[in-house]
């Protein structure tokens, strides 16, 4: 039987309806929610994100302001701006847009955002709270992945859960979240780039959460070397997780977002679409079609973890504004 497709859009819509009602209640009580995004310099990639944030906030009645700061801003100037926002009573939450110019140390700036206004849950205080069982605000993507899992199966006690990817913003927090229940957690294995036999681990997984972004990394590496003048065959962009790496009946949560070409011509160039632009597609790390035949449930890419991540950001903004205190 084909696996159930876990619908992230539907969950996000349900969450957004609740967020909208809570944002209205806060505004009616004289405490409107206001999220400030700090962007240093111009960046087309972050423009996509900030436009999306503005639209998402507007849709649920959360105030959104984009603070554009010149690219040549020094670390000290940026820290001073962040401290001012920390003290500003009209600002509920702060988000720092990536990437930052080379003179800025992202980690130091992230640590300067007040834990109470840290909408991404990336401040070490909020990460620490996660370790001790979770605070009001925690990282959005891990929270989205775990929420989609919990909605699919609530009782995870004794199951084998395998997380592929151990980054600070995705893989590690997911592992911590899975371990939060004192008596009913799954057994968690975390795999990463140095894992010797990935398939050995994934084939044991009743719950498989994948967040590596391997095809995207391969494609970008290939593109960089081609631009530098190397002659290279097209990269092999097969999904990291093939159907035979998935246990029958597993629940699969695919967190990855790989933006890669649909194919290459004989000369090794990216195929074009009918508008003459590179023909790109968005896929996860899992071979979705193959997984449908093996797994019991799977998140699609796009339409799975992505929309719920955005809803979690909005929910974190509410939390920063005191909605759940
Ligand atoms: P990252 O580059 O920081 O970390 C990648 C992780 O994958 C590392 O732990 C690395 O060890 C592991 N890895 C790399 N190659 C591997 C291999 N061959 N086998 C096993 N593990 C391997 O990336 P990240 O920021 O953690 O993001 C991971 C993925 O999640 C990316 O595709 C990213 O686009 C996606 N993402 C999605 C959302 C969302 O909203 N859905 C949000 C954030 C990130």
Image: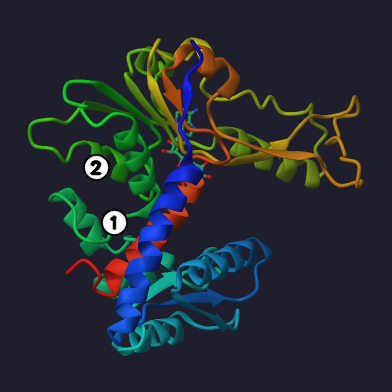
Q: In which quadrant of the rendered view does residue 163 lie?
A: top left
Q: Residues within 10 Å of mark 2 (few under 14, many from 20)?
A: some
Q: Are marks 2 and 1 in contact (CB under 8 Å)?
A: yes
- Which quadrant is the C terminus positioned in? bottom left
Label at residue 307:
none
Q: In terms of depth relative to the viewer, which is nearer, 300 or 77? A: 300
Can you identify the residue that label 2 sits on?
177
Taking the image as shown, residue 103 lies to the left or right of residue 139, namely: right
Q: In which quadrant of the rendered view does residue 140 lie?
A: bottom left
Where does the image place residue 172, in percent across and percent down from the top left?
31, 42
Where does the image place residue 203, in percent across and percent down from the top left?
38, 13
* SS class, disc 2: helix
Question: How is the protein colored in the picture?
Answer: rainbow
Image point 36% across, 72% down: which residue?
A: 23
- Judge whether 122 appears above or below 258 on screen: below
Residue 47 seen by the camera: yes
Mark with earlier residue (2, 1): 1
Q: Residues within 10 Å of mark 1 (few under 14, many from 20)?
A: many
Image point 36% across, 82% down: which residue?
A: 32
- Judge whether 176 appears above or below 296 on screen: below
* SS class, disc 1: loop
Can you identify the residue that label 1 sits on?
138
Q: In which quadrant of the rendered view does residue 47 lie?
A: bottom right
Where does the image place residue 34, in percent across and percent down from the top left?
40, 79
């Amino acid at each position: 039987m084909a696996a159930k497709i876990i619908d992230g859009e539907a969950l996000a819509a349900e969450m957004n309806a609740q967020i909208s009602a809570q944002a209205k209640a806060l505004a009616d009580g004289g405490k409107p929610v206001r999220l400030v995004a700090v962007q240093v310099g111009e960046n087309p990639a972050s423009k996509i994100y900030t436009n999306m944030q503005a639209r998402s906030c507007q849709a649920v009645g959360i105030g959104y302001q984009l603070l554009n700061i010149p690219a040549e801003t020094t670390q000290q100037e940026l820290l001073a701006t962040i401290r001012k926002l920390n003290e500003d009573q009209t600002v509920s939450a702060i988000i720092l847009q990536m990437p930052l110019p080379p003179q800025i140390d992202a980690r130091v700036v992230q640590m300067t955002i007040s834990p109470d206004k840290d909408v991404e849950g990336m401040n070490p205080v909020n990460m620490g709270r996660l370790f001790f069982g979770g605070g009001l605000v925690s990282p959005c993507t891990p929270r989205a992945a775990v929420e989609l899992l919990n909605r699919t199966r609530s009782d995870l006690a004794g199951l084998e859960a395998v997380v592929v990817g151990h980054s600070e913003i995705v893989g590690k927090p997911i592992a911590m979240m899975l371990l939060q229940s004192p008596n009913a957690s799954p057994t968690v294995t975390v795999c990463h780039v140095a894992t010797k036999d990935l398939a050995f681990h994934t084939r044991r997984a009743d719950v498989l959460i994948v967040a590596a972004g391997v095809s995207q990394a391969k494609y970008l590496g290939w593109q960089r070397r081609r631009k530098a003048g190397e002659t290279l065959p097209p990269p092999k962009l097969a999904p990291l997780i093939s159907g035979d790496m998935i246990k029958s009946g597993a629940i699969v949560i695919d967190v990855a977002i790989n933006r890669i070409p649909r194919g290459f011509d004989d000369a090794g160039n990216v195929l074009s679409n009918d508008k003459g632009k590179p023909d790109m597609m968005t896929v996860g790390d899992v071979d979705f079609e193959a997984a449908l035949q093996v797994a019991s449930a799977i998140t699609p890419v796009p339409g799975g973890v992505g929309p719920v991540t955005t809803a979690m950001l909005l929910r974190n903004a509410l939390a920063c504004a005191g909605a759940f205190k």
